[in-house]
Image (cartoon, rainbow, N blue to C red):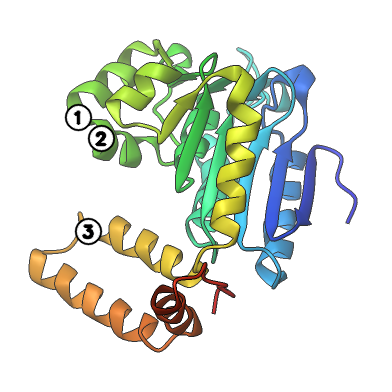
Amino acid sequence: MAFETILFSVVDGVARLTLNRPDRLNSFTEQMHAEVRAALALLREDRTARVFVLSGAGRGFCAGQDLADRSVLPGEAPVDLGASVENNYKPLVLALQNLAMPTICAVNGVAAGAGANLALACDLVVASRSASFIQSFSKIGLIPDTGGTYVLPQRIGVARAMGLALLGDKLAAEQAAAWGLIWSCVDDAQFAETVDRLAAQLALAPTKALVRTRQAMRASHLNTLEQQLDLERDFMRELGHSDDYREGVSAFMEKRSPRYTGE
């Protein structure tokens, strides 16, 4: 499938989707949303992919919604932003959360508005030291969307989440890592190498176990301790019958590196 606003490939078990509108800081249009959905649909059918990497081309990751793609000027017809959330950003976040493989977001520059919260929809976020995160919604009279009001308080607490949302201040990648908002911040010179190494590591890991770990982690704040223990029991029962578990135990006993298949 030919794409105009994104780059998409699957090589050596690593699926890569790059937002490719660098002249507009990879901001989203209706076309980009449609192409991302199409790529993720292809990925769900791909049996070779073991890890997903989301990134942005050029000097930024994603500046959120391209306001030029909508009619928002005074005197023009009102815009149904709720429809955009329902039809575009909601399915995008849920698709990332439900991918049957671990997900990495590589933030190489500014991640603003929906772009910041899109990054947080991935399992691991790695940012270059020059990157930053901005909850820019309040600057134009909106609330954080793309899961922002859900993820931010969970990761960094209500006080910090409220400050970022109300003030719309830039949060440096290093501070984001210190607060626990993202997994890691690395020097720009080592950024690409670090992301590639992490993707290669996860591509060789027991995929189903990693996905079940994600699901258990994300369910924990909704469950009582007893409910969470039951969930752990169910997942352990399932994974205990997997080929990867048998391979992991065999490799440990034989003192060799495991060869996981993701099954």
Q: Residue furthest right?
A: 2
Q: Residue at x 62, y 46 (%)?
A: 53
Quadrant in which residue 70 is drawn: top right
Q: Residue furthest front?
A: 255
Q: Residue furthest bottom?
A: 241
Q: Earlier in the sequence, mark 1 or mark 3?
A: 1
Q: Residue at x 40, y 89 (%)?
A: 241
Q: Which residue is mark 3?
A: 220
> What kind of element bears circle 3?
loop
CB within 8 Å, label 2 to label 3: no
Task: Tell which of 187 and 230 is nearer to you.
Answer: 187
Q: Residue at x 18, y 23 (%)?
A: 159
Quadrant in which residue 218 is drawn: bottom left
Q: Earlier in the sequence, mark 1 or mark 2?
A: 2
Residue type highlighted by circle 1: Val
Query: How far separated are the C-alphas under marks 1 and 3?
Result: 18 Å
Crowd class of label 3 (few under 14; some 14 to 19; many from 20; radius 10 Å)? some
Query: Which image quarter holds the C terminus?
Result: bottom right
Q: Earlier in the sequence, mark 2 or mark 3?
A: 2
Comparing marks 1 and 3, which lies closer to the viewer?
Answer: 3
Place of residue 28 in the rendered image (x, y in percent of width and height, measured from the top left): 67, 32
Query: How far separated are the C-alphas under marks 2 and 3?
Result: 15 Å
> What kind of element bears circle 1?
helix
Q: Which residue is mark 2?
A: 153
Residue type highlighted by circle 3: Ser
Crowd class of label 2 (few under 14; some 14 to 19; many from 20; radius 10 Å)? some
Place of residue 186 in the rendered image (x, y in percent of width and height, measured from the top left): 50, 24
Rendered image: mark on residue 158: 1
Place of residue 85 in the rendered image (x, y in percent of width and height, measured from the top left): 52, 42
